[in-house]
Amino acid sequence: EVQLVESGGGLVKPGGCLRLSCEASGFTFTNAWMSWVRQTPGKGLEWVGRIKSNADDGTTDYAAVVKGRFTISRDDSKNTLYLQMNSLKTEDTAVYYCTSLMVRGIINYWGQGTLVTVSS
Amino acid sequence: DIVMTQSPDSLAVSLGERATINCKSSQSVLYSSNNRNYLAWYQQKPGQPPKLLIYWASTRESGVPDRFSGSGSGTDFTLTITSLQAEDVAVYYCQQYYSALTFGGGTKVEIK
């Protein structure tokens, strides 16, 4: 059974930083492209960014609204995906989902999400 | 960025009737080299993460009931639920993966 378990969410002040983790199991993490998607409470879905598998060069790309502030990385030895979030803004408040990608952009599995609240 | 626009924002359908959701992209998501539309549909029930229903615009994910179908090409797409069931009450999102990823704003489906 595929499982994606996020952790690291919480309350942070504007301008602060936070690192989210996502532990994956039930599939071959090393071969997977992974991404983060967020959802503002009561609102829609917003893609944050993705990372290719290391076999596919391991590069990342990001949504314009987070580029330069957020960094996605992975540790294949730990089956873990990370999202480092710096210079946080109130508008970054959301539930952050860890997701696996099938064929570049089709999201086939989602974690349960972790809530990040940016507030003074 | 490719902007995805869904309509309507919400709809109420009687049990057993058809529900139709539209999705329009600001530019074509049809990749000419393989003739595939880079368009997916997801279902999100309250308190749950979204679930993949349809990809390549019309390919049903394994385990998804055949009352769900996707159609369209280029910039205009439709998700149809024939014979709506109570368990289909949810918010439905379209998403393009032609260029990065972007989602539509969602359509809430309720029982009339």
Image: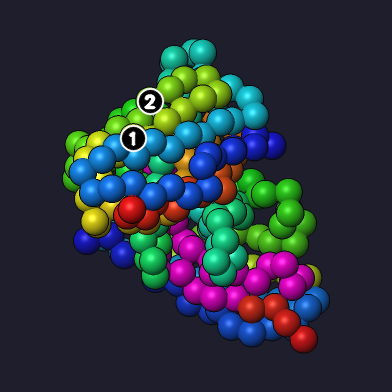
Q: Determine if residue B85 is in view.
A: yes
Q: Position of residue A104 (x, y in %)?
A: 47, 38
Q: Pointers 1 and 2 in contact (CB under 8 A)?
A: yes
Q: CA distance from mark 1 to mark 2?
A: 8 Å
Q: Residue at horizontal 69%, vertical 61%? A: A70
Q: Position of residue A11 (x, y in %)?
A: 64, 85
Q: Chain of mark 2?
A: B
Q: At label 2, which amino acid type do we have?
A: Ser
**Up-down relation of residue A5 to residue A53 (above or below):** below
Instruction: Determine the secondary structure under disc 1.
Output: strand
Question: Of the residues under marks 1 and 2, which one precedes in the sequence?
Answer: 2
Q: Quadrant of residue B36?
A: top left
Q: Dot 2: within a 10 Å radius of its alpha carbon, few (fewer than 14), some, or many (20 or more) residues?
A: some
Q: Which residues are magenta?
A: A88-116
Disc ID at residue B71: 2
Would you name the residue on which mark 1 appears?
Answer: B80
Q: Residue at horizontal 53%, vertical 39%? A: B7
Q: Nearer the viewer, mark 1 or mark 2?
A: 1
Q: Residue at horizontal 21%, vertical 43%? A: B16
Q: Determine if residue A33 is in view.
A: no
